[in-house]
Image: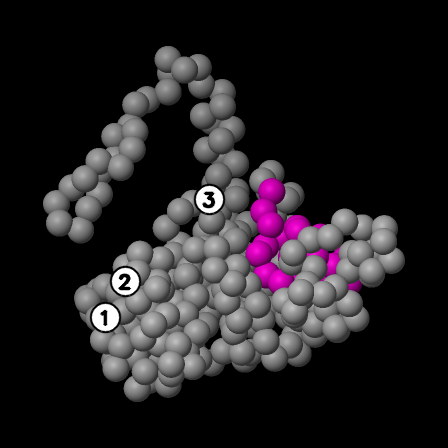
Amino acid sequence: MLCSLPILACGSHLTLKIYGNANLDDTIDQRDVDYVEGIINGTQEYSELADANNDGNIGQEDIAQIEDIVAGRETNLILKDTANRTVSIDIPVERVIVPSGLTAEAFKVLKATEKVVGVSNAIHEKTYFFPEFADLPSVGGWKIEDYEAAISLDPDLVISYEKWPPISEAEEKLDPAGIPVVVLEFTDPNFVTEELVKLSYILGTNGAEDRYIQWRSGYERQIDDYVNNLSRDERPSVFLETGFKGLNDVGT
């Protein structure tokens, strides 16, 4: 499907939590095929993600699934989402409901906005930034709330928060309609890169995330280099506040 930017080269370790990433690095490629062969032959240690089809056994079927993912011909993708849920998604994904503005930004980064079929009122309020979504149906204020509207859009996938609404509620409402829900939030800097790569695999956008990752990691390196050269006394104190109804302190 894609060969993502080697994120390890950016100075941080990332494990892409997609079944088929047998060697637990940041992409799925021939090295994962080799790793599964090593497990079968007894020369490599077992890893959960080596079970590419998630059937509880490591075998030739897993090698075939990994080869399909690498070639972009897989019909199913199994992953661990940001809520650590195991989610199975039929591929290709062409119709997605995206209530979160942050996730909508990720679709812009991946140049996949044409796959979005439903959004939220919060996205409608930002037509200056999301003009391509201005005429799409809404499924709620800033999260998925109108499940009947969501189901009527016949989506292949809904991308939601973990807690807004509770993911158990979204599953209960959408599972009977055969609509998978995956949690990708794009709120925690520690997970944004993995979530973006994961979304790129889901959408089949063939490495469209690489330019963003290079841009982001470049600025992260600049900030790290600058801050690491400051003594403790030279580092300014910072107070952050945020909130949906007034301000709440979130950290210093």
Q: Quick one: label 1, few (<14), some, or many (20+) residues within 10 Å?
A: some
Choose between 123 and 153: the one closer to the eye. Answer: 153
Report crowding for label 2: few under 14, some 14 to 19, many 20 or more residues within 10 A (C-alpha). Answer: few
Q: Which residue is mark 3?
A: 190
Q: Is residue 142 left or right of residue 44?
A: left
Which disc is residue 231 wearing?
Answer: none
Badge 3: few (under 14), some or many (20 or more) residues near its Cα, within 10 Å? few
Q: Which residue is mark 2?
A: 165
* Residue 28 among those drawn in magenta: yes
> Mark 1: which amino acid?
Glu
Q: Residue at x 74, y 64 (%)?
A: 58
- Amino acid type, label 2: Pro
Specify the principal SS of the magenta part: loop
Determine contact: label 2, label 3, CB under 8 Å.
Answer: no
Q: Where is residue 93? Give x, y as percent.
A: 49, 78
Tell me how far mark 1 sits from mark 3, CA to CA: 28 Å
Name the one closer to the observer, 44 or 27. 44
Quadrant where the N terminus sits is: bottom right
Q: Which residues are magenta?
A: 13-34
Q: Report the number of discs.
A: 3
Residue 145 tag number: 1
Q: Earlier in the sequence, mark 2 or mark 1?
A: 1
Element on which disc 3 rests: loop
Picture coordinates of residue 211, whole percent (x, y): 54, 56
